[in-house]
Image (spheres, rainbow, N blue to C red):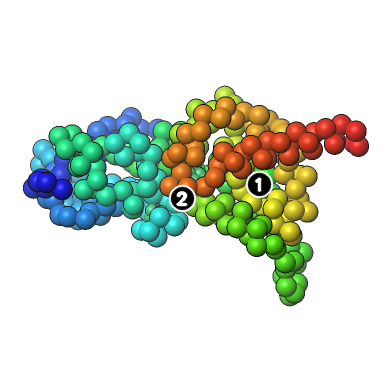
Amino acid sequence: MATAPSTIHVEILRQSTPDAAAVTERFAIPYRPNMNITSLLGEIALNPITADGAPTTPITYDSNCLEEICGSCAMLINGRARMACSTLVDTLIKEHPDKPISLAPLSKFPVVRDLAVDRAVLFQNLKVVKAWVPIDGTYDLGPGPRQFPQTQEARYPLSNCISCTICMEVCPQFSEDTNFVGAATIAQARLFNMDPAGSVLKEDRLRALAGEGGIQECGYAQNCVEACPKQLPLTEAISITGREVLLQQVKDLFTR
Ligand code: SF4
Ligand code: FES
C-alpha cells in the first residue's frame, strides 16, 4: 500500500434489540497493518468510544474460528456480503482510500443485535431437504459403502460449505415472498444425494425441492456462485439438481 493512514474511520449500523431503530455510530481507530474486520471490532471493544468522544457499548457480532471455517461472521462490509475474519482492512483502504469502512448486518435475516443476525432459516431449510446421512442407531455400523474417487472429487467442493448464508443474502429470489430455500440448501441436497449411504433419501430430497420455495424459484442470477467465500460450484449443483427434480416429478407421475 502506498501510504497507510494513521486512523481508520469506521461507520457501523447498530441496533440494540431486534425491534429497536437502527442508528449509525462512527469510530476512529488507530491504524495497524494487517488488521481484519474482526480485529477492528476487537479494538472498539477494548475502547468503546465513538469518534465524537461519547462512551458506547462494544459491538455485538458473531465469530468463532477466525479463519473462514465456522461461517458465523458474515456481514455487509462496504455494502458487500463478506466474512469479517477474512476481509482485510488494508484491502478495503486500497479499494476506497477516501471512504470510511462501513459495517452493517446482513439485510435478509432478522437482526439479533448490531451485526449479529438470526440465520436459523438455513438450518430449517437443511432439515426440509434432509441434508444428512441417515444412520440407524449408535452401535458400530461397520465401514460405510465405498465411493468412487470421481464421486469423492465431485462431492468435496460441496462439503466445503460453511453455512455463512452469503449466497442467500445476495440472491434476488431469496425473500419471504418466494420462501426460496437458497443455493446452499440445494448444494447440500446434491452433496448427500451423491453419497452412497445418503442417497437412500434422494427421492425425499428431490420431492422437497419440487415443493414450495423449491428449486423452481431459482432465477439463475448467479450472484451466489460469485459471492460464495468457499467457491462452491453452486450453479452446477443447481442445474444438475433441477434436472433430477424434473425427472423425479415425471417418475412420480407414472408410479404414484
Ligand atoms: S454455499 Fe457458499 S455462500 Fe452459501 S452458505 Fe455455503 S459457503 Fe456460504
Ligand atoms: S469467524 Fe469463523 S468464518 Fe469468520
Q: Is residue 255 left or right of residue 245?
A: right
Could you say whether the residue bearing mark 1 is in a helix, strand or loop?
helix
Query: Looking at the picture, how far across and down is residue 183, in whole percent?
Result: 56, 39
Q: Is residue 145 left or right of residue 150?
A: right
- Residue type of the residue flagged with mark 2: Lys
Is ligand 1 less than 8 Å from the beta carbon at label 2? yes
Give the quadrant of residue 94.
top left
- Height in image: 218 above or below 118? above
Please tell me the numbered disc located at residue 43.
Answer: none
- Residue type of the residue flagged with mark 1: Ala
Query: Looking at the picture, how far across and down is residue 200, in whole percent?
Result: 78, 54
Q: Is residue 245 left or right of residue 88?
A: right
The reply to whether dot 2 and dot 1 touch (C-beta < 8 Å) is no
The residue lying at 76 percent from left, 50 percent from top is: 201
Query: Looking at the picture, how far across and down is residue 33, in whole percent?
Result: 17, 55
Q: Residue furthest front?
A: 150
The quadrant in which the C terminus is found is top right
Instruction: Measure the alpha-carbon separation of dots 2 and 1.
Output: 17 Å
Give the quadrant of residue 23.
top left
Q: Is residue 41 visible?
A: no
Of badges 2 and 1, the one in the foreground is: 2
Q: Residues within 10 Å of mark 1 (few under 14, many from 20)?
A: many
Please tell me the numbered disc located at residue 230.
Answer: 2
Tell which circle, 2 or 1, labels the residue nearer the N-terminal end: 1
- Height in image: 142 above or below 45? below
Could you say whether the residue bearing mark 2 is in a helix, strand or loop?
loop
Dot 1 corresponds to which residue?
189
The residue lying at 37 percent from left, 43 percent from top is: 82
Compare residues 18 and 79 and report the one nearer the observer.
Answer: 79
The residue lying at 61 percent from left, 53 percent from top is: 154
Q: Is residue 43 left or right of residue 250?
A: left
Q: Residue furthest top?
A: 177
